[in-house]
Amino acid sequence: MKLINNLIIQIIPFLPKFFVKIVASPYIAGITDEEMLENVKKLNDKGFKVAIDILGEHVKTKDEATAVTNRYANLYNEITNRKLQANISIKLTHIGQDLGQNFVQNNLFKLVEAAKNNNNFLRLDMENTPYTDQTIKLYEIMKEKYDKIGIVIQSYLKRSMSDIERLADKNFNVRICKGIYVEDEELVFNDYSLIRESFIELVKKCLEKGTYVGIATHDEYLIDNIYSWIIENDISKNKYEFQVLHGVPMQKKLKKLINEGNTVRVYLPYGDNWYDYSVRRLKENPKMAGYIIKNIFSSIFRIK
């Protein structure tokens, strides 16, 4: 199966866009704001909370970065007006991180103000390591202005535990994920078991420190291991949530978590850049190729 997965990954970029769109549609929440907001409402009605992400990164012009910033700010108003259970998660390179410190800081401040005006939350996604220190610095600057802001820590980075030790306090809100970017070998754990072990230890350390944790994984081994530890240690359900990507086929597990009183948040990507996102996600995670095969046959032959 691994060989087939990798073969599909190689040919995906050469397939017609309409074909990729069919395959990727379960993982993308639409192109327009309205399509996405309708999907948020559907997920809320099923008991899920949502983190909204406009697809895109590494914008080239200040005009584009400003437009993205304004679009996110308006989404906070839409979330409030429609009484949706959703917050926003951004990549700093999407609002101008490559275009100057002052510029991206000003755009980020606009989003912090929009979140504050709507009593909502803002998450700063973590990109690859050239941006790690600056992302943490911007987080620390903005946290002084508004405390409903969080960051992401990646378990495959060797530095992550020291970052947690320094940053974690009772007002710290962090998403723990494995990490997907290709990095220099000396910076990361390359053994999958070590990445899993790091993930578990980071979550435990945060919860022991009283930090709010978004446990972002589709790895059922990690979910089961951490949830058992949470129950054994009587961790309050208001100190953590489980987070998953939109469209990942594990609904039975997620509904069970919700029915047991846990918060489950769906990361909801959408927008014009759906193609680049879809191809990148597939390249970064070959296991998703297995899902593609099933979707292709389901769509064409209507079999399950």
Image (cartoon, rainbow, N blue to C red):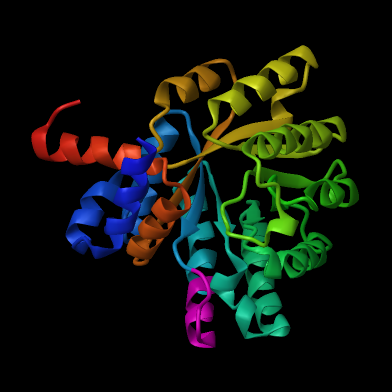
Q: Nearer the viewer, residue 176 or 119?
A: 176
Q: Position of residue 159 (x, y in %)?
A: 80, 53
Q: Nearer the viewer, residue 36 or 56?
A: 56
The residue shown at (68%, 78%) is 106
Q: Nearer the viewer, residue 294 or 31?
A: 294
How many numbered badges does the structure rendering display?
0
Task: Report if residue 142 is visible in the image.
Answer: yes
Quarter that holds the N terminus: top left
The residue shown at (33%, 37%) is 290
Question: Is residue 68 on the magenta stretch?
Answer: yes
Task: Report if residue 262 is visible in the image.
Answer: no
Residue 81 to residue 231: above or below: below
> Residue furthest toward the front?
3
Quarter that holds the C terminus: top left
- From the image, give the main secondary structure of the stretch colored magenta: helix
Q: Position of residue 112 (x, y in %)?
A: 67, 64
Residue 284 to residue 198: above or below: below
Q: Nearer the viewer, residue 207 or 281?
A: 281
Q: Position of residue 102 (x, y in %)?
A: 72, 83
Q: Read off the magenta span.
A: 57-69
Horizontal side of residue 232 vs 9, given as left or right: right
Q: Position of residue 243 (x, y in %)?
A: 56, 37
In terms of image quadrants, where is residue 215? Answer: top right
Horizontal side of residue 28 vs 134, given as left or right: left
Question: Is residue 249 on the magenta stretch?
Answer: no
The residue shown at (15%, 27%) is 303
> Residue furthest toward the top?
232
